[in-house]
Image (cartoon, rainbow, N blue to C red):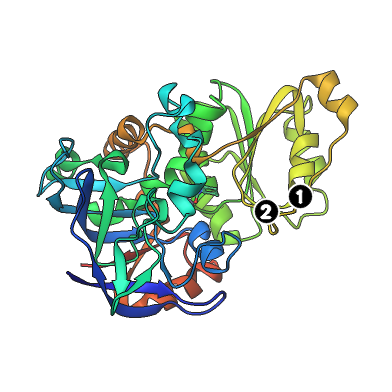
């Protein structure tokens, strides 16, 4: 079948909008007509080869749409179902078996290998293979092949009026921010949390911290509009990352140090500041991808031991998408998780303009409408 797709052909270059061929779903696969797909920083670093997926490639890992065909062995969804696409996991390694599929031992190959586990790709152009199966989907396209394992059924929620076309980011960025606070850090009622970076991940963390009834929710970001939005979504205090007196200002609010910190920036200096802002038995969650694959951060060992400080790398907010995503949608319906405030939609033809807008900080989360 022919599809339209945004193809990454070279690092740091515009995506090329092209017609490709897509295979029929295999036994455990699902063909999804994509309604909307979010753009995430991870798509751009894959295009730029920080994640070395073979190019040309169709990226995109925040898709949402309607099931149009299923393979013979699929039982979870049927044609007509509304689904969100999330990350892929193997389902049988020790991590998957203990419910930690975000740490599936095959996570890198299944999500950024550019192909299925058997090395094949469902995408091609004029007979030449095009890398696909990015996060088990490659949803920068009008149709995507996903696995039964990484589709989350949201038919009931969509029937109630939840807009399917903007749900895709719940599969990655929004789930990462909310899950980091709810599942990974498990921030306690009355606690203090500092969030470094108020993009889609950081602002989702702000909303989740409010849900957890954190007492002090500090968001740090260089963009005024994002700080303003953070305050509207539940931050109790916001600071400009460029503020020379940032450490003192945080100390004034948390004299014994914060209980939790979440870094969404990946910036080693910010991470060091996050460590020193923590109090006794404080926990730092790391979700931001660093600027280079070799990026290092250093910390004072004695300080970490003395105060029992913990540093935790987090993938996708330690979420189990089949249960966590419907829970987030319920919170959206009740008005407690207004993630739609982060989203700006763009037509498929404006794909590259959407990326420019995201890069310039004009929108928090760009969602491309594909059908
Ligand atoms: C990614 C970050 C890089 C590792 C895999 C998960 N999260 C979202 O895009
Ligand atoms: Zn992502």
Q: On the image, numbered disc 1 is attached to which residue?
A: 268
* Residue 234 makes an appearance in the image: no
Residue situated in front as seen by the camera: 118 or 259: 118
Mark found first going from the N terminus, 2 or 1: 1
Residue closest to the eye, 233 or 176: 176
Residue at x 16%, y 47% (from the top left corner): 71
Quadrant of the image for the N terminus? bottom left
Q: Is residue 293 left or right of residue 351?
A: right
Whole-percent x, y for residue 126 in the image: 28, 80
Q: Name the disc covering residue 289, or none.
A: none
**Quick check: marks 2 and 1 in contact, CB under 8 Å?**
yes
Q: Residue at x 78, y 48 (%)?
A: 296
Q: Element at badge 1? A: helix
Q: Nearer the viewer, residue 46 or 285?
A: 46
Q: Position of residue 182 (x, y in %)?
A: 48, 29
The residue tagged 2 is: 290
Crowding near pointer 2: few (<14 within 10 Å), some, many (20+)? some
Provide residue 366's location: percent of width, then percent of height.
Answer: 41, 63
Left of 70 or right of it: where is 335?
right
Question: From what the image shows, is residue 54 above or below residue 73?
Answer: below
What element does badge 2 sit on? Answer: loop
In the rendered view, does 125 fall on the left or right side of 81? right
Q: Nearer the viewer, residue 79 or 282?
A: 79
Task: Identify the residue at horizontal 43%, vertical 28% (top origin).
Answer: 96
């Amino acid at each position: 079948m022919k599809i339209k797709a945004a193809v990454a052909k070279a690092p740091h270059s515009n995506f090329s909008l092209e017609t490709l061929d897509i295979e029929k779903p295999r036994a455990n696969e699902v063909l999804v007509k994509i309604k909307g797909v979010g753009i995430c920083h991870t798509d751009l670093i894959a295009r730029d080869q920080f994640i070395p997926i073979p190019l040309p490639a169709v990226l995109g890992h925040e898709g949402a749409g309607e099931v149009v065909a299923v393979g013979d062995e699929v039982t979870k969804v049927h044609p007509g179902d509304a689904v969100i696409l999330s990350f892929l996991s193997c389902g049988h390694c020790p991590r998957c078996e203990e419910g930690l599929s975000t740490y599936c031992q095959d996570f890198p190959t299944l999500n950024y290998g550019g192909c299925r586990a058997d090395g094949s790709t469902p995408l091609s152009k004029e007979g030449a293979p095009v890398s696909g199966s990015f996060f088990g989907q490659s949803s920068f396209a009008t149709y995507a092949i996903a696995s039964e394992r990484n589709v989350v059924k949201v038919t009931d929620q969509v029937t109630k009026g939840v807009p399917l076309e903007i749900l895709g980011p719940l599969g990655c960025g929004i789930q990462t921010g909310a899950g980091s606070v709810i599942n990974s850090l498990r921030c306690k009622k009355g606690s203090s949390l500092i969030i470094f970076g108020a993009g889609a991940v950081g602002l989702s963390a702000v909303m989740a911290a409010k849900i957890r009834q954190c007492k002090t929710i500090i968001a740090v970001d260089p963009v005024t509009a994002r700080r303003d939005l953070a305050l509207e979504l539940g931050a109790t205090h916001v600071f400009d990352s460029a503020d020379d007196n940032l450490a003192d200002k945080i100390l004034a609010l948390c004299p014994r140090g914060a209980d939790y910190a979440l870094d969404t920036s990946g910036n080693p200096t910010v991470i060091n500041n996050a460590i020193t802002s923590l109090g006794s038995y404080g926990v730092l969650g790391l979700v931001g991808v660093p600027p280079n694959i070799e990026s290092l951060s250093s910390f004072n060992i004695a300080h970490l031991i003395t105060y029992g400080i913990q540093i935790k790398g987090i993938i996708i907010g330690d979420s189990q998408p089949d249960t966590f995503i419907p829970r987030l949608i319920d919170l959206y319906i009740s008005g407690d998780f207004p993630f739609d405030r982060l989203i700006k939609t763009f037509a498929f033809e404006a794909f590259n303009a959407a990326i420019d807008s995201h890069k310039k900080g004009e929108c928090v989360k760009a969602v491309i409408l594909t059908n």
